[in-house]
Image (cartoon, rainbow, N blue to C red):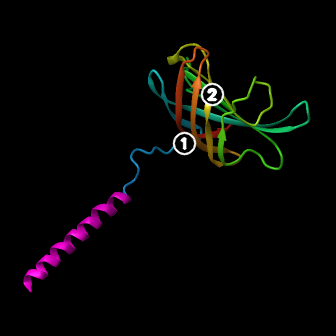
Amino acid sequence: MPHIFIKSLKVGLWVVLTLIFTSSSSIEEKPDKKILAAGSYMLNIAGERQLKLEGIINFETTKKCSPKGKEYAIIKLILNDNQELPGHSLEFILSKQYQSMNIGHGRHEISENIEGFLNYFDGVFAFANINQFGELPFFAKNGAITIDDINDRIIKGSINVVFENPNDKIVGLNGEFSAFRK
C-alpha cells in the first residue's frame, strides 16, 4: 500500500512540474519588442549587406481626380533618417480609387502595373534611396504595407517589401512604423 502511494505521489509531482514549466513559457513576453514612438520606424534590410534603418516617418493624405473624372484617395508615407547628410530616404504612395471610404486597415499590395509617377492607380508604389547600396534608386517590386491602426493623426503598421534597382540589385525590407501627420 505505501508503495502505491509513493508511486502516485511521484507521478503527481511530475504532472505538476510539467504543467508549471509549460505554462510559464506561455507567460513570457516576446523578447525586445520595442514600442515605437509616433513618427518613427524600425526597418531591417536584407541584401548584400544587413542593415537596420531608423528615423522619422510622416504621412500626408490627399484626394486627386484623374482626367477621366475618377477620384483617388492617396496616402504618402515619407521616411528619412533625419541626418544632415542623409544615408537613406524612402517613400510609399498608397492609392485607391475613392468610392465611399478612404484607405483603411488591412494589407495593401505593391502594384505591378504602374508605368509612371503621375498615373492613377490602385495599390502601392514605393521607392528608396539607400546610400549603403549605391547611388541608384530602388523601386518596389513586390510585397505589401499592412495598416493596423489609422486615424487623423497617426498611422501604425508594418512594411514587408522587396526593392530592385535598375542594375537588378535586390534588397528586402521589413519592419514596423508609426507615422505622424505632417
Measured from the top left, where is residue 91 in percent x and y? 65, 28
Q: Nearer the viewer, residue 68 or 87?
A: 68
Q: Amino acid at mark 1?
A: Ala
- Checking the image for residue 123, the label placed there is none
* Left-right relation of 142 to 66: left
Residue 55: quadrant of the picture: top right
Q: Amino acid at mark 2?
A: Ala
Discs 1, 2 touching: Cβ within 8 Å? no
Residue 67: quadrant of the picture: top right
Q: Give the secondary structure at mark 1.
A: loop
Q: Residue under circle 2?
A: 140
In the figure, 34 relative to 44: above or below? Answer: below
Q: Residue at x 50, y 18 (%)?
A: 132
In the figure, 173 relative to 176: above or below? Answer: above
- Of labels 1 and 2, the one closer to you: 2
Q: Between marks 1 and 2, how big is the CA–CA gap?
A: 26 Å
